[in-house]
Image (cartoon, grey):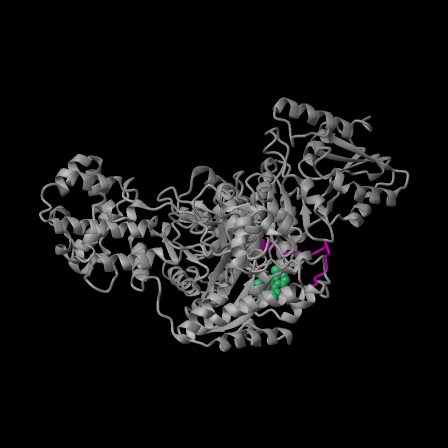
Amino acid sequence: MQDSIMEQLWGTSHLAGGNSSYLEELYESYLRDPNSVPEDWRAEFDKLPRVNPSVHSEVPHSPIKDHFLLLSKNQKKLSTAVLSPSITTEHERKQVRVHQLATAYRFRGHQKAKLDPLGLEQRPSIPDLELQYHELSKADEDTVFSCSHLYAGKEEATLKETIELLEQTYCSSVGAEFTHIVDTAERRWIEQRMESVKSHPVYSNEARLHILERLSAGEGLEKYLQSKYPGTKRFGLEGGEALIPLVDELIQRAGSYGTKEIVLGMAHRGRLNILVNILGKSPRDLFDEFEGKSFYEMGSGDVKYHQGFSSNVMTQGGEVHLAMAFNPSHLEIVSPVVEGSVRARQDRRKDPVGTTVLPVAIHGDAAFAGQGVVMETFQMSQTRGYKTGGTIHIIVNNQVGFTTSRREDARSTEYCTDIAKMVQAPIFHVNGDDPEAVVFVTQLAVDYRQQFKRDVVIDMVCYRRRGHNEADEPAMTQPLMYEKIRKIKSTLDLYGERLVNEGVIDKDGVTQMAEEYRTALENGEHVAKSLVKEPNTSLFVDWKPYLNQPFSDDFDTSLDLQYLRELANRINTVPEGFPVQRQVNKIIEDRLKMAAGAMPINWGFAETLAYATILDSDHPIRITGQDVGRGTFVHRHAVLHSTKDGSTYVPLRNLSEDQPEFDIYDSFLSEEAVLAFEYGYATTTPNALVIWEAQFGDFANGAQVVIDQFITSGEHKWGRLCGLVMLLPHGYEGQGPEHSSARLERYLQLCAEQNIQVCVPSTPAQVYHMLRRQITRNLRKPLVVMSPKSLLRHKDAVSTLDELATGKFETVLDDPDITDKDAVQRVVFCSGKVYYDLRERCRRDEIVNVALVRVEQLYPFPEDRLYQILSTYPKVEDVVWCQEEPMNQGAWYSSQHHLRNVIHRHDPDLYLVYVGREASAAPAAGYMKLHLEQLNKFLEDALVYPKK
Ligand code: AMP
C-alpha cells in the first residue's frame, strides 16, 4: 500500500523530474501548522534546520528542496524513510492524497477547463484529476479533511467541497498554467488570487452592465461596418468581442496603478474595433477610410488596418496616454517595436522599474506559435538593455490561422502560448464566451505585472465568425467548425441573456444599449467611453521641431579645438584605483596622446569623442548590439572592466553631473527583435542618438523585415520619423563569404524619396562628423553606415584633432595626394576601404595621373558635389567606378546612373567603366589566395591604363 503511494508520488507527472512543488506545499502547511501534515512528514520536516515561525513565508526553500532531492535519488530510501509503515491512520493517508489531488489540479486543471466556446476541442481525460488515481473514492466525499493548503478561507472542508473549489477555480472558464514558475511567492500569489474567489469573483451590477455595454460596442461596430461596407476587408473581431471589455479593463486598472502611458501593438484582427471603441478614433474618419476619401499626403500611406493612433483616456488614477503602434502585415514583428517604444518612454520618465509605461501586445494564436521573433521578444524581457517591467500579452485565439487548422498543422505544442513558459510567464487561458472570466484574468494579469514586473499571457480562446477577412469563405477549409459557428449565439447575446435571467437588465435595456451605440456611430460621434477631448500634451513628446526639415547635406559640426581636447582628456581618464587590462590601458594612453596632438587620431578615438560632444550638448545616446561595449573589432572600449573586481566604468557616463544618459548594452544574440526594438526606441525619442551595431554587417539579414517594413518605409507609409543609426561592419579582407559584405546593395536598392541615408565614411574625422550631423541637425532619417573592420587600425586611416574641430561631414572626398590636377587622366570613383588599397598602389607605383575620389555618402547621392570635384580635373579622359564587391553587389547597379549623370554633365563624351570583382553568387571568396588574386587583378585594372 505504501509503496503504491510512493510510486504514485514519484510517478505522477507533476511530481516527476525533480519537481518539488508538492513537497514545498506540504512543507508550507507544516510551517503554518505542524499538525496539518501526517506524522511521518512531520517527523521528516522536524529534521530540517529550524526556522523562525514568524517569518515562515519568507523561508528559503532551497534547503528542503536539496534535502528531498537527495532523498529522491534513492526512492527506496525515501519510501521507507518517509512514508512507510509509520503513517499511522487511514485518515492521515487520505489527507496526503487529498493534498496530492489539489496539487494535481493546480498543475493540470487547465487541461480539463472548458476553454473552447465552440466545444469542438477533444481533450483527453486527465488521470491525475480522478479520485481513484489518488486512491480516493466517492465514499470519501463527505469526509472532512484539512484544506489549510488551499486558499479556501477555512481550515477544513469535505472532500466534495474541496473538489468543487478546485473544479471551479482551475477547470471552469479559466485554465491557468503557472506551476512552471520556480519562484514560490509568485505561484502562491496566483493560487491565492484564483482559489480565494474560485476564479469567479462577484462583480457588481454596475460592473456587469459596463462589461455588457463594451461587448455591445464591440459587436455593434462590426455589425455596422458589415451593413455599410459589406465584403470590404476589415478583419473583424466577430467571435472575439470580449477583447473590448478586456482591453478596457486593462487600461482602467493599469491607470489606477499610476500608469501614464500604454503602448499597444496588434495585428489586423479587431484592430479597427480597438481603434474606435478603445482609443477613440473618430468613426467618421474610419468611414472616410472605408470610402477611400482620406490620404496621407506626404507619402504612400497604408491600409486602414495597419494604421496606428494616439489618444488620452481618463482612468481612476488620472489621464493615460494610449499609443497604438503602426504595424505591417508581418504579424509578430510589431511586438519588439512596442517594447522599444515603451523602454524609450520609461527612460524619458526616468522609470527603471517600468511602472509608468505599460507594453501590451495583442497576438493571433497562429502567429504567436509560429514566428520566431516571439521567442526573441520573450528573451529580451528581463535583460538589462531591453526590459520594460513586464508585458501583458493577449492572444485573440480564434483557433485557426487563415485557413490552417490548429491541430496537426499549425503547431507542435499543446497550446499556442507554450513559448511563453521559457520566461516562466503565467498563462491564463480563458473562454472568450465568459466575459466576466475574461475580465477576471485581465485583472489578474495587470496585478501580476504590477507586483512582479514580468511578462504575463492571457490566452482568450474564441472563434472567428467570418473568414480570414470578410471576402473569404471559411467553410471551404473548416466546414465542421463553421457549421458549428453558424449555429452559436454571439458572446453579446449569451451575456445579455445571462444578465436578463439574473435580473440585472431587461431585454429592452439590452436592445436600447445597441441602438444608442448605432445612433452614435451614425452621427460619427466618438464611442470610446473615457476619451479625453483635450488631451494633456505633456504626456508625450512634441515632434514639431523635427517635422518638415530640409534635407541638406551640408551641416556645420565644428567645435572649438581646446574644448575638444579637454573633453577627450575627460573621457580618457580612469579613476584612481581602477586597474584595467594591459592592452586596454595602452589604448587609453594612446588616446591621451592623440588628445595632446602627439599621435594621429584613430577611429575609436574619433567615434568616442563624437559621443562625448553629443552628450555634452544634451542629447542622450543609446548604443546596442552584440559586443558593442568593447566593439566586435576591439576599437571602442566604451565600457572598461576592472581587473581587480570585474566592476565596470563607463567614461562617457562620467562627463558631468547633469549630463544625459549614455546607455550602452551588449545585446543578446538576436538581430530581428533587437533591431525592431531600436527602431521603436528611435521613433519615440527624437532627441537621442540611437545606434544599433551589427556584429558583422550581413547579420542584419536576420532583421530584413525590420529594414523593409519599418526603417526604410515607415515615414512614407505612416509619417513616423526615425533617426536610427545602423553601423554595419563591411569590408573585403579575405575572411570569407559570411564576414565581408554588409550587403550594401540591399540598402541602396531600397533608397527612394530621401527615405534613408547610406554612408561609407573612410576616415576617423568623417565618422565623427557623420555621427554629430545625425543628431545635431533636426532631420530625423535613418542612417545606414558601412562601418570598417581592418580600417579601424589602418595606419593611413587617421585624422587630426584639427580636422575634428574645423570640418564637417563631406559627402565626397577629393584625392589629397594629387598635387597637379592637370596631370590627371583618369578619375577613379570609389567608396570605403578599397580607397586605401588603391592609394597604396598609386603610392607604390608612383602613379600621378590617376585621382582617387571617394563617395562617402551613397544616398542621397551627392551629384552636385561630385560634379564640382570632377570639374577640377580638366584633362580627364576616362572615369572608373571601382568597388571591392562583386559586380552584382555593392553600389554599382544602384548608383551608376548617378555617376553617369555627373560624368555626362562634365563631359558628354566621357564614359564610365566598371572595375571590380566579377558577378558572384556568394558575397566573397572563401579562400585568402583567391581573394588576393581577385584584389590584385581589379586594382591593376583600375590603375593600369594610365601607368607610364
Ligand atoms: P505617441 O506618444 O507615439 O502616441 O505620439 C504622440 C504624437 O507624437 C503622435 O500623435 C504624433 O503626432 C507624434 N509622433 C510620435 N512619434 C512620431 C514620429 N516617430 N515621427 C513623427 N511624429 C511622431
Residue 205 location, quadrant:
bottom left
Tell me which secondary structure the magenta stretch mostly adopts. Answer: loop
Residue 633 location, quadrant:
top right
Left or right: 830 in relation to 184: right
Residue 819's place in the image compared with 350, above or below, is above
Left or right: 458 in relation to 279: left
Residue 827 location, quadrant:
top right
- Identify which residue is drawn at 66% across, 36% down: 833
Left or right: 873 in relation to 296: right
Is 573 contained in the magenta span? no
Q: Residue furthest right?
A: 909
How many badges with numbers are in the image? 0
**Could you tell me which quadrant the N terminus lies in?**
top left
Residue range (magenta): 548-564
Residue 217 spot, x, y in % from top left: 54, 69
Residue 96's place in the image compared with 2, above or below, is below
Can residue 190 be seen here? The reply is no
Residue 56 spot, x, y in % from top left: 20, 57
Residue 835 spot, x, y in % from top left: 70, 36
Q: Quadrant of ligand 1?
A: bottom right
Along the viewing direction, whichever of 900 and 509 lies nearer the viewer: 509
- Identify which residue is drawn at 56% across, 43% down: 694
Along the viewing direction, whichever of 387 and 690 lies nearer the viewer: 387
Along the viewing direction, whichever of 452 and 539 lies nearer the viewer: 452
Residue 124 spot, x, y in % from top left: 37, 45
**Could you tell me which quadrant the C terminus lies in?**
top right
Along the viewing direction, whichever of 400 and 142 lies nearer the viewer: 142
Is 562 contained in the magenta span? yes
